[in-house]
Image: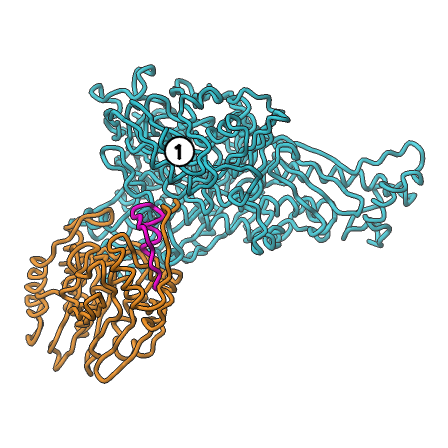
Chain colours: A cyan, B orange
């Protein structure tokens, strides 16, 4: 199934005349967005709408002694000042656990803190006023008396008996622990020629979206209905949870999600302040808007990574990797996030370490601890960058030990391309991966040998460049195995309804959502291709629980693979229905007819027989002319979920080429390459840009991004000047190539591509930095690789 | 992230602005390009009662050369400096420096007067003023005051300007013939505030510095015109001489620690900059070989 075509233009299964599959067609929503006609939640204004501002705790851990609101209530424009206790009459607390993550525990979390705050930035009161500015003015007049409590901030000591327990009812600060042991690890290490150990440290960082989290909640007491306009990745999940905690039926809640200014996993969770906004609307019986500002985004948008992972690798002198062992520790803040939980990242690390390689000897422990910092949860490429950095770091360091080329050690250990189906040492099942084809293509794209020669020549001139390689696997198209089996009402299936309307154009409703990935485009491309209709006749509707089929949304690289297949199957049914009625009208048979360029044509000679618009006119306005008993169905709905494999794994490999200045510790990224295999490519431009965007977020983690907390649990860089996001000036050119191994779970064959870039970028950069550092006899296993970190490792400061 | 309520007035003339300042004193803030003031207001770090917008005082905008003096109006924007032929011809150091000031959107609005009056020790232009021997011209209730750049900056965000004074212009001596310059800064990303930066101006005769002015920034609470430069003037530069100058520089620095760098790292990078500057200005790559400081 594996082909090495760079960007396949067509695919046999979908190789229809004028197919849009595999073509870089422009996104249909571009003009609308470019001309400022997008509808972001931040743009929404409703009659009688009020603005909520949250007063947030300045302390990482404190008892709330008292809240004095009377002065604030007198301020101009103020509608209400609401404490956590008052709001708890409208909304119930929640606990972020899933039953399949055995032993995972967390404490009840309230929409607004009651009695106690557990991180700097947790809301202690809401001020609702006629404008955001008035609410901010009034918030300055709410006085809260705190009694500071000991803040648990260092994950390394969170489990010490001397450290206070954040939630007494839980008994300790351990949220989750997973232990995995496969093969014969001790024996494998004993038989190794070299064993290498290191501690890998990952900075806490976050996803910085262009549009912050935003919600407008509109409780209509007259209809007993709550409409939530929210920038979310999963509208049906929001509907379910809002209903559950506000004491409503799901039918009383409608979630509308139009344009979303970036998400990256940040907007796939249920945040306390969003729940509070729904509750405030119900309490005050009017629309309430909350748009997080940039500072509170840094303090409350989920953070991610923040792992310390000890890793160990055993290797034979011939390069055979004998075993991997890891001990991972991560601190997730005071609560496990709801409803997807904060144990998933550590769980993924255990799942993914060693994943590309043959060895079956693998032992892992992961511990997830509570601390008084902002909540942590799933952000783009959950767990992947940790697992990839540890695995690939260990592989490179092992190669260094036995003086083997990094490419060669991978060639000798990556799972063979003809070995599938098979399973990883952690038990993950792989349908079809292409590690060797991908590595071969990468080596060719980067002209590896020439680059090594250039590196050697420059070293003589005291110019220190490095090459880093990182193979990776990526979890995509998740089935119910992710959340559903653990009891979360997060759908893993998606649905698409397609109809031919009276003018011969196509309306398509899908349950996947759009945050800029191109969900609208890929849906229109698939539907247009299958139906034989030009894309400009296909309108895609998404992001509305009242008006789309029920489904999961867009996250975990699932939109194209799952939602795309549902679109394909729905369009196939509609196509059949159209041809059935066309055959009647044309006194032909469906098998003799096809649809091309918006018209029914003869299969044999392609001669046009009837325009779709004319056929639709007959069906909708002159059904009396159809023979008796003919009832055309020009609308079809199909749902899809993968059933054979819990996840459609993809694979790929990245490489970084960079220059390190040993005098300054600065790293200049010169070039980055990615070869990945996401199966069928629907829109190569969208896929490549997804990869590039993902790489840039990975490069941010590698060199720039870190939420810096002090020992008292204060986030000290919650602004865009001090929290460094990667910017275009520092980004290298990123070349993207593909290997195509379609999944056989679906007719479309598409796997996900949204997280591949982020999965391996930091690992490639770290390996390249260590390659550049070779002459200096030091290695670094900590990101971000700041000048301070590098100069310190070099002993220059 | 909305500013606290404030009153706003657009000054119609310098006299009008001064009048408003003398009436309102510290309760008033001057709005020039607004690139530091407005974010600070939106973060509610400052909450002035009155904003005096001087943006329309066109007489304060522009670059002029008269004899040996280059005058830059306080409202001249960074983008204007970057495009100005007079600056390129008579103060090329300044042109190089401005390219490092933030990003185009900020350079389109930010002004030289605003930057100098704001006196961020990590920003580029204050150090350039020291290096270029600028005179800062302020007007206040008592008339015009001329302040030498090396007396103007007195601390973090602190200058000798009084709340009643308005910075109206800076004067620079036109670049002497045969002078050369060096500008570089270390920043995590292009456009960020520097971790350490150096604005240098020199004249070179027979492979030696006849004059050398080294304006360091982000190495303390204000820009620093390094006295240790004198150790490099009128001598044959050897690695030993350079190393002695570097350790003299070390004594002059009083760097702060922040999230980007410890004080030790700033000291280290300042010495790297010194070495690179000297090696580049004298076209002596041999000096750089031992640059590891």
Hey, which quadrant is residue A305 in on the image? top left
Residue B293 in the image: above or below residue A401: below
The residue that mark 1 highlights is: A74
Between A776 and B29, the one nearer to me in the picture:
B29
Is A629 magenta? The answer is no
Residue A82 in the image: above or below residue A457: above
Q: Measuring 27% from the left and 20% from the top, which residue is drawn there? A: A165
Quadrant placement of the C terminus of chain B: bottom left
Looking at the picture, how far across and down is residue B284, in whole percent? 17, 72
Q: Measuring 42% from the left and 58% from the top, which residue is drawn there? A: A733
Residue A95 is left or right of residue A479, and the answer is left
Hey, which quadrant is residue A470 in on the image? top left
Q: Measuring 20% from the left and 71% from the top, which residue is drawn there? A: B144
The answer for which chain carries disc 1 is A
Is B47 magenta? The answer is yes
Residue B163 in the image: above or below residue A548: below
Q: Residue furthest bottom?
A: B67
Looking at the picture, how far across and down is residue A21, in whole percent? 64, 49
Specify the segment rendered in magenta. B35-54
Quadrant placement of the N terminus of chain B: top left
Q: Is residue A739 visible?
A: yes
Between A428 and B59, the one nearer to me in the picture:
B59
């Amino acid at each position: 199934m594996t082909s090495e075509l760079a960007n396949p233009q067509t695919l046999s299964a979908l190789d229809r005349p004028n197919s849009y599959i595999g073509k870089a067609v422009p996104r249909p929503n571009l003009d609308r967005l470019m001309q400022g006609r997008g509808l972001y939640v931040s743009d929404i204004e409703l009659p009688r709408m009020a603005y909520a501002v949250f007063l947030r705790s300045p302390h990482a851990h404190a008892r709330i002694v008292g809240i004095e609101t009377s002065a604030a209530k007198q301020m101009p424009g103020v509608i209400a000042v609401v404490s956590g206790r008052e709001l708890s009459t409208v909304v119930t607390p929640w606990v972020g656990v899933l039953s399949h993550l055995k032993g995972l525990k967390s404490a009840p979390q309230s929409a607004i803190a009651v009695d106690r705050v557990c991180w700097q930035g947790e809301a202690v009161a809401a001020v609702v006023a006629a404008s955001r500015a008035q609410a901010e003015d009034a918030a300055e007049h709410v006085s809260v008396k705190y009694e500071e409590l000991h803040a648990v901030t260092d994950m390394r000591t969170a489990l010490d008996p001397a450290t206070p327990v954040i939630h007494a009812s839980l008994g300790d600060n351990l949220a989750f622990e997973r232990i995995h042991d496969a093969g014969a690890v001790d024996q494998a290490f004993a038989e190794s020629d070299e064993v290498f150990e290191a501690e890998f440290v990952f900075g806490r960082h976050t996803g910085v979206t262009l549009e912050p989290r935003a919600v407008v909640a509109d409780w209509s007491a007259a209809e007993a209905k709550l409409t939530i306009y929210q920038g979310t990745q999963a509208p049906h999940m929001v509907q379910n949870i809002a209903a559950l905690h506000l004491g409503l039926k799901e039918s009383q809640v409608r979630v509308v999600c139009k344009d979303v200014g970036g998400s990256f996993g940040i907007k796939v969770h249920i945040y306390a302040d969003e729940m509070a906004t729904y509750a405030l609307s119900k309490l005050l019986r009017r629309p309430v808007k909350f748009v997080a500002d940039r500072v509170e985004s840094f303090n409350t948008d989920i953070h991610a990574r923040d792992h310390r992972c000890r890793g160990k690798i055993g290797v034979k002198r011939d390069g055979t990797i004998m075993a991997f062992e890891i001990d991972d520790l991560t601190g997730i803040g005071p609560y496990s996030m709801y409803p997807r939980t904060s144990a998933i990242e550590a769980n993924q690390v255990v799942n993914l370490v060693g994943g590309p390689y043959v060895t079956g000897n693998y032992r892992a422990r992961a511990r997830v601890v509570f601390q008084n910092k902002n909540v942590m949860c799933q952000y783009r490429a959950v767990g992947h960058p940790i697992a990839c950095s540890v695995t690939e770091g260990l592989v490179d360091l092992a190669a260094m030990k036995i003086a083997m080329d990094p490419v060669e050690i991978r060639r000798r250990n990556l799972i063979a391309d003809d070995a599938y189906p098979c399973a990883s040492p952690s038990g993950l099942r792989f349908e079809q991966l292409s590690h060797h084809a991908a590595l071969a293509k990468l080596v060719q794209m980067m002209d590896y040998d020439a680059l090594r020669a250039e590196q050697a020549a420059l070293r003589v001139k005291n110019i220190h460049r490095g090459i880093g390689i990182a193979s990776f696997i990526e979890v995509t198209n998740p089935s119910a195995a992710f959340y559903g089996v653990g009891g979360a009402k997060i759908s893993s299936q998606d649905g698409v309804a397609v109809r031919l309307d009276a003018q011969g154009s196509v309306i398509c409703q899908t349950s996947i959502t759009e945050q800029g990935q191109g969900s609208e485009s890929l849906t229109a491309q698939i539907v247009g291709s299958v139906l034989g209709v030009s894309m400009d006749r296909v309108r895609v509707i998404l992001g509305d629980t009242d008006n789309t089929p029920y489904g999961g949304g867009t996250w975990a690289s699932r939109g194209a693979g799952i939602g795309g297949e549902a679109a394909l199957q729905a369009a196939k049914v509609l196509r059949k229905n159209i041809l059935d009625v066309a055959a009647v009208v044309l006194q032909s048979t469906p098998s003799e007819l096809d649809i091309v360029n918006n018209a029914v044509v003869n299969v044999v000679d392609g001669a046009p027989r009837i325009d779709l618009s004319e056929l639709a006119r007959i069906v909708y306005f002159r059904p009396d002319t159809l023979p008796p008993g003919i009832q055309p169905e020009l609308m079809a709905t199909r749902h899809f979920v993968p059933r054979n494999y819990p996840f459609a794994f993809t694979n790929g490999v990245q490489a970084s080429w960079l220059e390190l200045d040993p005098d300054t510790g600065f790293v200049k990224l010169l070039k980055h390459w990615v070869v990945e295999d996401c199966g069928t490519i629907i829109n190569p431009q969208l896929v490549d840009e997804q990869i590039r965007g993902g790489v840039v977020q990975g490069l941010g983690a590698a060199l720039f991004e870190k939420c810096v907390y002090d020992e008292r649990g204060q986030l000290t860089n919650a602004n865009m000047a001090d929290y460094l996001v990667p910017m275009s000036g520092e980004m290298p050119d990123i070349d993207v190539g593909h290997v195509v191994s379609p999944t056989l779970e679906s007719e479309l064959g598409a796997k996900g591509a949204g997280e591949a870039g982020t999965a391996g970028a930091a690992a490639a950069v770290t390996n390249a930095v260590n390659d550049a550092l070779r002459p200096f006899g030091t290695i670094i296993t900590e990101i971000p690789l700041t000048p301070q970190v590098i100069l310190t490792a070099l002993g220059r400061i | 992230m909305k500013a606290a309520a404030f009153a706003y007035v657009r000054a119609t003339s310098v006299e009008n602005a001064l009048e408003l300042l003398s009436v309102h004193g510290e309760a008033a803030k001057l709005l020039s390009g607004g690139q530091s003031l407005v974010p600070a207001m939106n973060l509610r770090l400052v909450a002035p009662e009155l904003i005096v917008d001087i943006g329309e005082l066109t007489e304060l905008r522009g670059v002029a050369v008269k004899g040996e003096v280059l005058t830059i109006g306080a409202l001249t924007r960074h983008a204007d400096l970057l495009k100005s032929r007079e600056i390129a011809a008579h103060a090329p150091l300044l042109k190089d420096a401005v390219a490092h000031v933030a990003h185009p959107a900020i350079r389109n609005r930010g002004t030289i007067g605003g930057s100098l009056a704001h006196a961020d020790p990590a920003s580029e232009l204050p150090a350039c003023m020291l290096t270029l021997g600028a005179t800062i011209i302020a007007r206040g209730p008592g008339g015009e005051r001329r302040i030498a750049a090396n007396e103007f900056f007195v601390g973090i965000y602190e200058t000798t300007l009084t709340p009643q004074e308005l910075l109206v212009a800076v004067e620079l001596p036109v670049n002497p013939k045969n002078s050369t310059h060096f500008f570089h800064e270390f920043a995590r990303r292009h456009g960020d505030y520097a971790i350490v930066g150096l604005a240098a101006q020199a004249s070179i005769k027979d492979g030696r510095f006849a004059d050398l002015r080294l304006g360091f920034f982000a190495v303390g609470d204000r820009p620093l015109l390094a006295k240790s430069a004198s150790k490099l003037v009128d001598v044959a530069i050897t690695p030993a001489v350079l190393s002695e100058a570097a350790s003299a520089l070390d004594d002059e620095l009083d760097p702060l620690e922040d999230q980007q760098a410890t004080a030790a790292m700033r000291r280290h990078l300042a010495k790297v900059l010194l070495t690179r500057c000297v090696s580049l200005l004298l076209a002596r790559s041999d000096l750089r070989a031992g640059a590891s400081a």
